[in-house]
Image (tube, grey):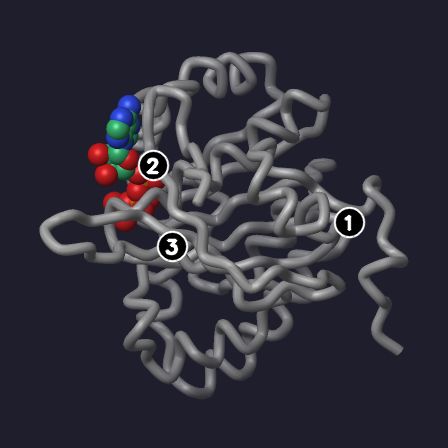
Amino acid sequence: MARQSSELTMEERLAFGLDRIDQILQGGIPKATCVSVSGPPGVGKSLLATHFLLEGLAKGEKCVYIHLNEPDSSIERMIRSFGFGNQLMEYQKKEALVIRGLESDIFSKRLTEIPDRLSEGKYSRVVIDGFNVMIADMDNASFRNNMRSFLEKLKEKERTSLIVSEMDNHNLSNFEKMFLYGVDGIIFLHFMRFGHDLQRTLFIPKMRFTKLEDCEPAFSISEKGIEILRS
Ligand SMILES: Nc1ncnc2c1ncn2[C@@H]1O[C@H](COP(=O)(O)OP(=O)(O)OP(=O)(O)O)[C@@H](O)[C@H]1O
Ligand SMILES: [Mg+2]
């Protein structure tokens, strides 16, 4: 039987360190789940994911950031462009954070081998960024055969993962829909238009073991990273 949200203690949730988001999530993402973060280019997907890693690192957890669509050299540049990027790179120096790009040997043609490589370390938080390249490359058979076992294996050893993809959340392909059906939680980031202005918003339509609020808070990006705006 599915666990009820009230059964999860705070130790069984992993916070973002962003008050309003953690409040919506009753404390954070349930441990040992796979959660999708998707949205259009530049909306703040990678930034949200790095907040998640930074919070874990500050608590002494070991974390991994993998980008399936960026060479190693450009990942560090991207991370350093975030206000707290240098802090993250310090954790990498101390070997609490592992960062791997496109050229890493952690990747192979087989999706399901990524969790095997992750199992060699004791990581509590994993971010797999640029995942849309994996979805775009799949045919029906490989999707059916590999995606379910990939998601199950990612959750082994109590790992909690954010899977970050560029997607048009309002116009999903069939594979994107199937992928979102298979994950435990979904975080959509959007650009909303108000007259001549654009506003970034965050919407969580699904999160297992969690009673979600029906809300779509707006957020802005500054040197401090993501800041949820009070409505
Ligand atoms: N200090 C800052 N102040 C304001 N905006 C910033 C700041 N630093 C970064 N940004 C903005 O944050 C956005 C980058 O966020 P991020 O890289 O997380 O987006 P993304 O959704 O992952 O994009 P992509 O699809 O290109 O990977 C950019 O639009 C950038 O202009
Ligand atoms: Mg990104």
Label 3 to label 1, Cα distance in Å?
26 Å
**Of tags 3 and 2, which is closer to the observer?**
2
Instruction: Indicate which disc residue 220 carries.
Output: 2
110 relative to 60 in the view: left or right: left
- Nearest the viewer among 180 and 122 is 180
Secondary structure under tag 3 reads: strand
Tell me which amino acid carries mark 3: Leu
The outermost residue toward the front is: 231
Q: Is mark 2 within 8 Å of ligand 1?
A: yes
Label 3 to label 2, Cα distance in Å?
12 Å
- x, y (%) of residue 70? 30, 42
Give the quarter of the figure containing the C terminus: top left
Tell me which amino acid carries mark 2: Ser
Q: Is mark 3 within 8 Å of ligand 1?
A: yes
Q: Which numbered disc, 3 or 2, marks the residue that appears first in the sequence?
A: 3
Q: Which numbered disc, 1 or 2, marks the residue that appears first in the sequence?
A: 1
- Rendered position, 183 above or below 26: below
Could you tell me which residue is drawn at 75 percent across and 55 percent down? 156
**Of tags 1 and 2, which is closer to the observer?**
2
Could you tell me which residue is drawn at 75 percent across and 45 percent down? 13
186 relative to 160 in the view: left or right: left
The residue that disc 1 covers is 158
Secondary structure under tag 2 reads: strand
Could you tell me which residue is drawn at 36 percent across and 27 percent down? 79
Give the quarter of the figure containing the N terminus: bottom right
65 relative to 57 in the view: left or right: left
Secondary structure under tag 1 reads: helix
Residue 80, image quadrant: top left
Whether residue 229 is visible, yes or no, is yes
- x, y (%) of residue 2? 84, 74
The residue that disc 3 covers is 189
